Amino acid sequence: MIEIERLTRRYGSRTGVEGVSLRIDAGSLFGFLGPNGSGKTTTIRVLLGFLRPTEGRASLFGRDCWQAGRQIRQDVGYLPGDLRLYPSWTGQQYLKLFGQIRRRDIAAAGGDLADRFSLDMAVPVRKMSRGMRQKLGLLLALAHEPQLLILDEPTASLDPLMQEQLLQLLRALAEKGHTVFFSSHTLSEVERLCDRVAIVREGRLVADETLETLRGRARRRFTIRWVRLTDAADVKPPPFLAVDERRNRTWDGSLTGETPQLVQWAATQPIEDLTIGHPDLDSLFRRYYAHGPEADAS
């Protein structure tokens, strides 16, 4: 569905992305992550045929994104991170316009999505809340049932119930063979949806792995509450525990070793309570943000 080979895009002396390579199969739920300014938007604009690569190549559906951009975009749904809409237009007007641009009748599908999103299509954009405008952008990206969805920060401004509605819809589309390219700067946004994640930092790809692989690498958080205040102060942490904070009788930190090591050690200590959390992907992701792939070895 998507092939990117050694993609580099420069803006004069500034580099947007450099040497990025990705291959994404049809039916994937793919997360594209990185801090603001990392190169996510540049990559998306190359995929959509809006920017020409300085070096390398990018293709969708087996066709070059720059040379066949107009044809490719007919079967792509795109939600930009900086969605801008004419304030006087209604959702109905936008739906009609997009149908004309795509040369197909999307009124019925758009109406179904409006009902699903609880969006009044007769309201002008200037009277819409941020969440309503985001719903409209999603509706316009989805109404023509594209084979590829490129979504940039799609859950921004959506309430939790609407976020879950969207994730359910995207999962159902992936089961039918549609592909979702989900760009974000927040790992928690994609953790509930995606099965694979690529991370970019300063224009370079620093990770391209499944969520399961990342979970296996991430450290678990722990909380220990000691029986006595003196225990919390006097006990020396074992080498497989990194204690980040000590508060009265409580230790908070991350497990750098294996869970059984912590359990066996805790059984010999005057501990009142022990909590071991899920793999802390956010901390792993922050290390990638700060230092790149070498951070994981620390």
Image (tube, rainbow, N blue to C red):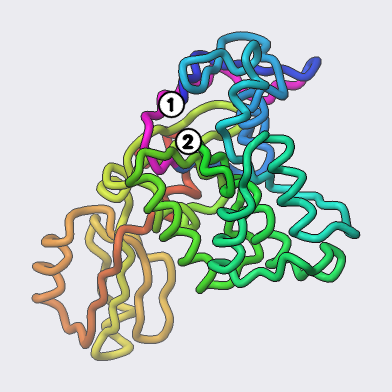
Residue 206 % position (x, y): 47, 31
Instruction: Tell whether label 1 touches label 2 (CB within 8 Å).
Output: yes
| Residue type pointed to by label 2 | Gln
Q: Is residue 275 above or below residue 177?
A: below
Q: Main secondary structure of the magenta part?
A: strand
Q: Quadrant of residue 76?
A: top right
The residue positioned 34% from the left and 60% from the top of the image is 242
Per the image, label 1 sits on a secondary structure element best described as loop
In the visual, does 173 lie left or right of 92?
left
The residue closer to the viewer here, 13 or 160, is 160
**2 or 1: tag closer to the N-terminus:** 1
The residue positioned 59% from the left and 24% from the top of the image is 72
Query: What's drawn in magenta, residue-wise?
Result: 14-30
| Residue type pointed to by label 1 | Met
Q: Find disc 2 in the rendering and name its residue.
A: 147
In the visual, does 34 lie left or right of 216?
right
Per the image, label 2 sits on a secondary structure element best described as loop
Q: Find disc 1 in the rendering and name its residue.
A: 1
Residue 92 % position (x, y): 75, 58
